[in-house]
Image: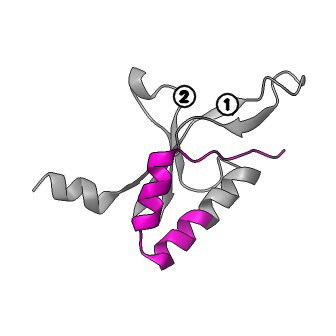
């Protein structure tokens, strides 16, 4: 089964600011999401605000995604698209805000 990854504009901007070696790893992980979004270190996010969203570990970064079912294909229940947000966050950034 193939999935399509849609990257949010804000996430694309964040990705441009990430060093090239780390960016490549994230892009490789995004490619992996197209074949099996739940492979690797993936966990569902908790809370009503994050319902249906997951996070995937990509080195020191986190890819937040929401799998959506494709309603235009006619095959009910067949997942084939990632939804509106694929933000990328860094654990380092989170730690800096706590200092």
Q: Nearer the viewer, mark 1 or mark 2?
A: 1
For residue 52, the mark is 2
Q: Nearer the viewer, residue 36 or 80?
A: 80
Q: Magenta stretch mostly in which secondary structure?
A: helix
Q: CA distance from mark 1 to mark 2?
A: 9 Å
* Above or below: residue 21 compared with residue 69: below
Residue drawn at (75%, 44%), measured in percent from left and top? 3
Q: Can residue 87 be seen from the camera position used here? A: no
Residue drawn at (44%, 47%), measured in percent from left and top? 10
For residue 68, the mark is 1
* Above or below: residue 48 compared with residue 79: above
x and y percentages locating residue 79 in the rendered image: 76, 33
Indicate the secondary structure of the residue bearing disc 2.
loop
* Above or below: residue 17 compared with residue 74: below
The answer to whether 35 appears left or right of 94 in the picture is right
The answer to whether 65 appears left or right of 93 in the picture is right
x and y percentages locating residue 68 in the rendered image: 67, 30
* Mark 1 Cα shell of 10 Å, populated few (<14), some (14-19), many (≥20): some
């Amino acid at each position: 089964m193939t999935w399509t990854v849609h990257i949010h504009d804000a996430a694309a901007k964040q990705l441009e600011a990430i060093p090239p070696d780390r960016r490549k790893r994230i892009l490789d992980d995004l490619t992996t999401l197209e074949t099996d979004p739940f492979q690797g270190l993936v966990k569902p996010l908790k809370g009503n605000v994050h319902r249906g969203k997951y996070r995937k570990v990509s080195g020191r970064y986190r890819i937040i995604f929401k799998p959506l079912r494709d309603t235009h294909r006619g095959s009910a229940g067949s997942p084939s698209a990632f939804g509106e947000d694929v933000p990328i966050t860094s654990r380092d950034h989170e730690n800096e805000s706590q200092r």
